[in-house]
């Protein structure tokens, strides 16, 4: 069904740039769709593919060649990315929002320091952002000078945060702590949702209830959120056999003839301060009932590499969806676990796979909706994730710019449409 939804989203690439010798013209779609066609036996095709997939095509700005209105002129990894407007571009007379090019230059600056972000906005050195933290935007909105100069708001978006369990550990490097759904449900009841939302999110975020963003057309509104319930969580853990038998403060249980403690690492993304706050507050709450979750900060590459390779106990992360129909295959099909995909938890069986396949190939929205809602209920019942919060997008844009549009979907703010009022022709630069 995504073939229908994404039909208008296929990127067009310049043949003379990416295939100067016109190698691909010698092959047909039918050949590439034929399972008996052995592309590896064609040296010409292999040479083209090697060149196309070479690392320099993703690192050398001179080789970045898209058909959009802007091109990359400067890229300093970890510092800034500069786009400049192309001259005499084919979209110059287009009325489409996505084909306008207002600013002559767009400068993306990477700044993870909260104090520096606030200073830059108060000094009006930044024009816009769609990625400020909740705490940062709230502090900025408390400043009268900022409010005079900027339009800023919290808007809904298709992103949610979660904590994932390793439901299929190897039993050696990662113990069988979360194979029992009762344990997963108990830990979900031990997350201090209200406290986290108040302290970290400043009360701005909504609870995420299941695997679909609540903005989705086929979101299951019958799903029930999990709330903090220490008493019920203790009962579930006790009934599942996890008790502190040696009075060391940590629950334990005999599994496969070995005494295991309910102690594990809680991985999180180190570069974002909010994730540390999440991890610490969850860990402290677990500790009260004899569950030890050690916050484990990792860089982005390591965090997701370990997740794909099932090399984790529990992890904090987020998924960003969009307004297109949801295909659960990537996150929830068992093949995505077997092939080291994004099914990090090991969720699923033949029944859920069949349901996912039915959803994936049902192009009729009305017929797909009940399948999607049934699937969402199964995920919630199995608790492979602790669903945390539906994130709000934090957007700020200087009032010097007109023609501004805020959206639920990514990127939240269109920079290419920005214009300076009463200015015809050349526009100033935009810094984000």
Image (cartoon, helix red, strand yellow):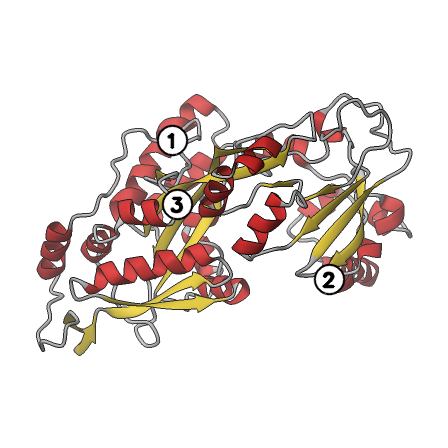
| Disc 1 to disc 3, C-alpha distance | 23 Å
Q: What residue is at 43 percent from the left and 30 percent from the top? A: 215
Q: Quadrant of residue 352?
A: top left
- In the image, residue 293 lies at what x, y percent? 29, 66
| Disc 1 versus disc 3: nearer the observer | 3
Q: Position of residue 157 (x, y in %)?
A: 48, 36
> In the image, is 414 to the left or to the right of 49?
left
Q: Nearer the viewer, residue 59 or 296?
A: 296
Q: Are marks 3 and 2 in contact (CB under 8 Å)?
A: no
Q: Residues within 10 Å of mark 2 (few under 14, many from 20)?
A: few
- Which is more N-terminal, label 3 or label 1? 3
Circle 1 is placed at which residue position? 219
Q: Is residue 308 above or below residue 263?
A: above
Q: Residues within 10 Å of mark 3 (few under 14, many from 20)?
A: many
Q: Looking at the picture, does residue 253 appear above or below residue 218?
A: below
> Does the CB distance between marks 2 and 1 fall below 8 Å?
no
Find residue 273 and report its horizontal and vertical position in percent.
Answer: 46, 58
Question: Tag on residue 201?
Answer: 3
Q: Circle 3 sits in a helix, a strand or a loop, which is it?
A: loop
Residue positioned most to the front: 144
C-alpha separation, residue under disc 2 versus residue under disc 1: 43 Å
The 10 Å Cα crowd at callout 1, few under 14, some 14 to 19, many 20 or more, is many
Q: CA distance from mark 3 to mark 2?
A: 51 Å
Label 1: element kind: loop
* Residue name at image x 30 percent, y 58 percent: 281
The answer to whether one can see residue 381 in this image is: yes
From the top left corner, tell me how far across and down residue 117 is, in percent.
58, 51
Q: Earlier in the sequence, mark 3 or mark 2?
A: 2
**Residue carrying label 2:** 40
Is residue 422 toward the left or the right of residue 281 in the image? Answer: right
Badge 2 element: helix
Q: Residue at x 9, y 55 (%)?
A: 235
């Amino acid at each position: 069904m995504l073939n229908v939804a994404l039909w208008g989203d296929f990127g067009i690439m310049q043949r003379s740039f990416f295939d100067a010798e016109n190698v691909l013209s010698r092959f047909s779609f039918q050949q590439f769709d034929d399972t008996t066609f052995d592309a590896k036996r064609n040296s010409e095709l292999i040479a083209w593919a090697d060149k196309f997939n070479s690392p320099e095509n993703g690192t050398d700005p001179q080789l970045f060649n898209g058909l959009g209105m802007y091109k990359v002129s400067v890229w300093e990894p970890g510092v800034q990315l500069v786009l400049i407007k192309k001259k005499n571009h084919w979209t110059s007379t287009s009325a489409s929002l996505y084909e306008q090019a207002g600013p002559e230059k767009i400068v993306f600056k990477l700044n993870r320091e909260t104090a520096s972000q606030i200073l830059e906005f108060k000094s009006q050195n930044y024009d816009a952002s769609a990625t400020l933290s909740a705490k940062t935007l709230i502090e900025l909105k408390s400043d009268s000078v900022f409010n005079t100069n900027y339009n800023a708001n919290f808007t809904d978006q298709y992103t949610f945060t979660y904590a994932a369990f390793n439901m299929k550990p190897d039993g050696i490097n990662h113990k069988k702590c979360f194979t029992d759904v009762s344990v997963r449900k108990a830990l979900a009841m031990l997350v201090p949702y209200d406290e986290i939302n108040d302290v970290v999110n400043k009360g701005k975020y909504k609870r995420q209830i299941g695997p679909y963003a609540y903005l989705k057309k086929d979101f299951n509104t019958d799903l029930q959120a999990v709330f903090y319930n220490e008493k019920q969580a203790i009962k579930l853990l006790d009934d599942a056999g996890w008790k502190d038998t040696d009075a060391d403060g940590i629950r334990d249980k005999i599994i496969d003839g070995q005494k295991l403690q309910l102690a594990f690492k809680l991985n999180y993304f180190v570069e974002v301060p909010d994730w540390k706050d999440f991890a610490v507050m969850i860990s402290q709450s677990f500790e009260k009932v004899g569950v030890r979750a050690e916050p484990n900060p990792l860089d982005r590459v390591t965090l997701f590499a370990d997740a794909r390779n099932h090399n984790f106990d529990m992890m904090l992360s987020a998924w960003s969806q969009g307004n297109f129909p949801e295909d659960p295959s990537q996150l929830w099909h068992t093949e995505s676990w077997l092939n080291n995909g994004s099914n990090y938890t090991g969720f699923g069986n033949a029944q859920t796979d069949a349901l996912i396949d039915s959803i994936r190939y049902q192009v009729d929205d009305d017929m797909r909706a009940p399948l999607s809602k049934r699937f969402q209920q199964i995920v919630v019942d199995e608790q492979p994730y602790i669903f945390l919060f539906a994130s709000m997008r934090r957007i700020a844009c200087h009032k010097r710019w007109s023609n501004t549009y805020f959206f639920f979907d990514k990127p939240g703010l269109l920079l290419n449409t920005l214009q300076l009022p009463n200015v015809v022709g050349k526009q100033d630069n935009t810094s984000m």
